Image: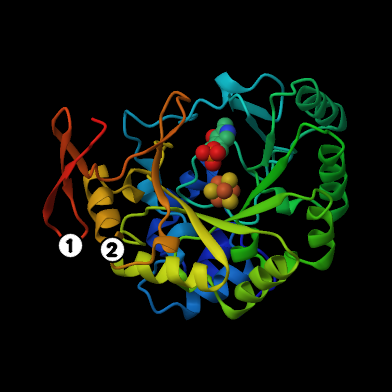
Amino acid sequence: METAHTLRKIDDLERHKLVDASERAGIVSVLEKFSLAVTPHVLGVMNNSDSEGAVAAQFVPSVAELQEHPSESDDPIADVKHSPVAGIIHRYSDRVLLNVIKTCAVYCRYCFRRENVGPGNGGLTPDQLDAAIDYIKNDDQIWEVILSGGDPLTLAPRRLSAVMERLADISHVGVVRIHTRVPSVAPDKITDDVVSALKKHRAVYVVVHVNHADEITPQVAEKFALLADSGIPLMSQSVLLKDINDNATTLTKLFRTLLANRVKPYYLHHGDLAKGTHHFRTSIKRGQEIVRELRGPLSGLCQPHYVLDLPGGHGKVPIGHQYLEQLSSDTYEIDDVFGEKQTYVDTRG
Ligand SMILES: *Cc1c(COP(=O)(O)O)cnc(C)c1O
Ligand code: SF4
């Protein structure tokens, strides 16, 4: 039986046979800690996906979330430490995150801000939003503003439009970036009104969060096209997830599908140390192997940066394979993409 409503409760999951009755108590404990939302669109994708649960595992809670690794944290990348005023995270001099809202269309089970997002969290009050905008206005080093999660595209288009207008009025803000999962999980929310709101700033970039090619249904592709045809450059971020996309074949398909839909793969994130997410992480060694396998056979345009967001708020760093080994002051041994070693003489070395 289909429902047009977002699944938010244990009973909804049971009704759709997404969890087993024997797991009920465990799942109830999970839902006490972390929010749940599965949109009707995602439910449809899960049911039609032929890749063994790769979509479902991202959104359907599991009792494994109750296991906490000692290195996991409720603030894995130290957002709190870098928040000068509510809604602003200022880690790098030239750019800030502006988190206007704390709700998302879905709650990804591996989310790095999972203790901070959810329907009970209202987001910024009008006064707090004023203060956040003032913070940006008062620091002319801030060149880029990134609207992030919660998911900014769950804002009503009218509110989004007002925020975009206020950012467009600040002359030192050269670029506005939107980080969103809405196009791939609730495509019906990407309307002409949303596009007009985004277009209030001339240099708006949309970074869509997608982890598996099965998420790019015809309806999702249509929304990517709407955004791209409106002149909005699209990029993607994906999280490397165990048993979901942690192999070269799955990632090749994902990155090709994105690029063919005019979405440039930007980041492949190593899973953050959020509580109860151990079962989603691969080892860095395995991540490096996979990314190395892609380099060569897969178009350079399809290659994202494989990055780790360092715990403690020390920023994102590329953690891919190190191809270069310095042998002497002017000589390097370099791994080529065909699996052989080459020598390179640096004439300026
Ligand atoms: C990820 C992040 C950014 C954006 O970093 P880029 O490397 O420019 O994509 C900016 N600010 C904060 C606080 C972040 O966590
Ligand atoms: S959409 Fe982003 S912020 Fe929201 S739950 Fe998923 S990963 Fe977290």
Q: Is residue 202 above or below residue 318?
A: below
Q: Secondary structure at mark 2?
A: loop
1 and 2 marks in contact (CB < 8 Å) = yes
Label 1 within 8 A of ligand 1 by Cβ: no
Q: Residues within 10 Å of mark 2 (few under 14, many from 20)?
A: few
In primary-sequence order, the first of circles 1 and 2 is 2
Specify the quadrant that holds the N terminus. bottom right
Q: What residue is rendered at 50% in x and 25% in y?
A: 78
Residue 282 pos. (x, y %): 28, 49
Nearer to us in this view, 348 or 30 = 348
Residue beneath disc 2? 296
| Residue 6 appears anywhere in the view | yes
Residue 334's spot in the image, x, y percent?
18, 46
Q: Residues within 10 Å of mark 1 (few under 14, many from 20)?
A: few
| Badge 2 amino acid | Gly
**Residue position for label 1:** 338
127 or 305, which is in the foreground? 305
Q: Please identify the quarter of the rendering in which residue 125 is found.
A: top right
**Left or right, 71 with reference to 38:** left
At label 1, which amino acid type do we have?
Answer: Phe
Q: Is residue 337 left or right of residue 119?
A: left
Counting labels gives 2
Q: Nearer the viewer, residue 253 or 245?
A: 253
As drawn, 55 above or below 281 = below
